[in-house]
Image (cartoon, grey):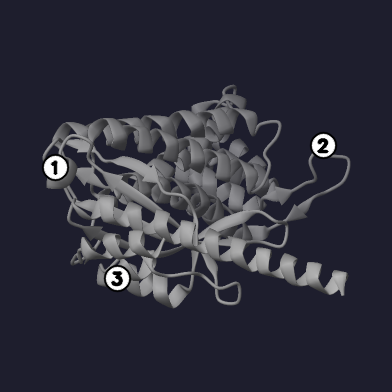
Amino acid sequence: MSEARAEFNHTWRSFNPQPYRPETGLPIRGFLLLLLSTGLTGVLVGLLAGIIGQWLYVVILFPILMGAIVGHAGAWAVDRGRVRSPLLGGLVGILGGCAAVIALHGIEYCVFEYQLREVPPEVRQIARDFEKLQPQFATLPPDVQFVILQLREDPEARETLAVHSLWTYIDRRAREGVELRDVGDNGAKAGLNLGYIGSYCYWSVDFLLIALIAAEMIRKAAARPFCSRCDEWKTETVLPAFPGSPLVICDAFESGDFRSIANHVASPGDAETFLATLFHCPRCTTESALDVRLAQLIVKKKGEPTEKLVCELSYPGEARESLEQAIVQSIRATVAAQTREAQSAADAESVTSQT
């Protein structure tokens, strides 16, 4: 074992890592595909949510689903169009969220206009010009005076009939106040009315959920490692999880000297579990940079592991073989040490039982 390790160390190389940075390429066709796909999906998702929302709208859940759908469409377009600009990808995701929100309220406005289809346009125009017509009330035709008198007696109807655009419809809804009801409530009891400011805050939260989820999904897709030589996304390879001291592992990755990983035997007291993901080009092999994402595996209380990003670095392509060998040797050395400790404990227990 020691001879094999010594031989391995004689051929060891050190590498000079650099912080990983996305390539930031932006093909025109890819950007147009991203813009069209994200915008169209946002409109369709908003229309669908607006139609379903006439009967059921689940707070928080619907915006999350809408953002995820828009984000998936944008990520697909990023992959197909080879868009590598995380900043522009995120901005397009926000635009997709805007399209979804506008379409959502737009379908509600269309339903509102359909319900008022039998109201004469002249009456609605009088409602819009109600304040302007007051000084000249005595000189107006009798039929116009009659409508004005009716609108005076019903301010709520006057404000409803005065709606003439999407913005005035949204503002009218805010004045009425959005009501939150329990799922399945048939309207027998009043829900929680959020009021004017609360309604705008509620819609703002909806928009932020949709836009930020979509933007983050598209940004992550555009930030993936890319090989400019082949004009292709790099292949992702996840190495086996390996134990180690955080100080030793982080120093080895940041210095580019994997010798300490190969020679490191994790002790139970300071060992954490790490996961290295490699991004490499199968065509260019060593001619293309090796991008590495190092994460620490953390087990939650429920027993579900989650990844905590430690660092993202880029190495020369030749570093892949050395890194893989170092991790394999570290795992073997740690397993061998644990086996020897277990065997020693078993031998000691056997001797104790015999005596």
Q: Earlier in the sequence, mark 3 or mark 2?
A: 2
Q: Amino acid at mark 3?
A: Glu
Q: Amino acid at mark 1?
A: Ser
Counting from the top left corner in percent of width and height, residue 76 is at 36, 33
Q: Is residue 149 visible?
A: no
Counting from the top left corner in percent of width and height, residue 200 is at 56, 57
Identify the element where label 3 is drawn: helix
Name the residue carrying label 2. Answer: 184
Quadrant (top left, top right, bottom left, bottom right) of the N terminus: bottom left
Asked whether the beta carbons under mark 1 and mark 2 sit within 8 Å of each other, the answer is no
Q: Is residue 354 visible?
A: yes
Q: Nearer the viewer, residue 234 or 60?
A: 234
Name the residue carrying label 3. Answer: 254
Identify the element where label 2 is drawn: loop
Counting from the top left corner in percent of width and height, residue 280 is at 26, 44
Q: Earlier in the sequence, mark 1 or mark 3?
A: 1
Asked whether the beta carbons under mark 3 and mark 2 sit within 8 Å of each other, the answer is no
Q: Amino acid at mark 2?
A: Gly
